Amino acid sequence: MALAVDVEKQLGAFRLAVRFETAGGVTALFGPSGAGKTSLVNVIAGLLTPDCGAIRLDDAVLFDAAAGINVPPHRRGIGYVFQDGRLFPHLSVRQNLDYGRRMSGRVQDAAEFERVAKLLDIGALLDRRPRTLSGGERQRVAVGRALLMRPRLLLLDEPLASLDIGHKREILPYLIRLRDEAGVPMVYVSHTAAELRLIATNVIRMDGGRVVAADGLDLLREADANSLV
Amino acid sequence: MHSLTPAEWTAVELSLRVAIIATAVALPFGIAIGWLLARVDFWGKTLLDGIVYLPLVLPPVVTGYLLLISFGRRGPIGSFLADYFGIVFSFRWTGAALSCGVMGFPLMVRPIRLALEAIDRRLEDAAATLGAGRFLVFLTITLPLALPGIIAGAVMCFARALGEFGATITFVSNIPGETQTISAAIYSLLQVPGGEAPAGRLVLLAIAIALAALIISEWFARRAGMRFRGE
């Protein structure tokens, strides 16, 4: 996987102007609140259209302002795990997990479903409604839902931020298993260095809408010294 | 309660037919207009908003008269539809359905619009990232989430259509078996000596139909609500 982003976007008084490339693994987007991390992830997903620039994923052009290319979000094949889960309240857990497959019209793959449900330990929740799930369970289902659409790239926007410390400890091992077993490239947004030390394979630090540093995991040690946890 | 005469049954059957057809035909338009008002900013939106709610504030006789001069035999829309599609409204039960639909429309649009405005649009974004195009998002996320509002709107329209009197009698008159709904029949019965007893039967029946509609809609709305609460 190779993701190349070079975009600019004016959002009110805030200006997002970002350029970076990454080659697979888990790329962390790290920085304080208001650094533009979520906006950048929305741009990659296609939910926010940049003013200029280009986005490439492997050999596919997802966005190119000069060439007039803007692939809509539903054709990008990019999974997105939102901070707040965003499970569909009118559907069961099973229907939520199955949503991506239904929308793409693929035939059901019971083995794949089973494997993801097992990986995230959500097999016992399938017939429940999202509202009856705990925060940790909800995020695990959200990860499973994004995985089952067979993404080329998985975006995770502070997937642990809405959880208390116990639930964070509950879900992080699943995300690490995801990295090591599923092999899906990820862009992982967080402002918590401790969390990223466990999961990231390379780090891009953002501040004020810009990339301020992009050289590996050393950044986190430095951040750690500033006690950002 | 004595059994109804065939003439009274005709009025009841006609009222139900008119109200059901009016609601069913108005519903797609109600959803489209509700969506437009809730989601899209366009030039003339305030005007459209005003026109939609006009039948609610105009005297029904005025609405009926406006329908008569536009959808009547010699009206511009009425003559066009009659000449090219063979659809005739004047002095037909279809005209009664049209006036009932127009009168019920604002009551239908309002709850649908409110329901659409209340939907968390971020859920629609989530559906898009999962591979659903705009129409599929609307069909699988927006519409089901707005269902309680759509049911409420349909029931309001149905109730209004069932009770409509002023616009209908102005537009298509009061012809037994064709345009004489329960309301018009009660009105006619009360104009003649000895009409109180049959009018009373129709009044009781009108109450029964209205109550049944309310109970059925409550049941639907509760079921739809239960799905969201995860029961």
Image: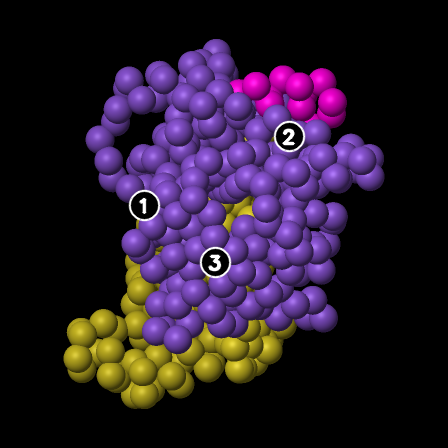
* Residue at 40 percent of width and 63 percent of height: A63
* Residue A117 horizontal side relative to residue A42, left or right: left
What chain is the purple one?
A: A
* Residue at 57 percent of width and 34 percent of height: A200
Looking at the image, do the residues carrying marks 3 and 2 touch, with CB atoms under 8 Å apart? no
Q: Which residue is mark 1?
A: B6
Q: Which residue is mark 3?
A: A5
* Crowd tier of the residue under label 3, counting other residues whose Cα lies within 10 Å: few below 14, some 14–19, many 20 or above: many
Badge 3 element: strand
Which is more foreground, mark 1 or mark 2? 2
Tell me the number on the disc at residue A197: 2
Badge 2 element: helix
Residue furthest top in the image: A124
Which is more foreground, mark 1 or mark 3? 3
Q: Chain of mark 1?
A: B
Instruction: Find residue A181 and report its horizontal and vertical position in percent.
Output: 41, 21
Is A107 located above or below residue B44 in the figure?
A: above
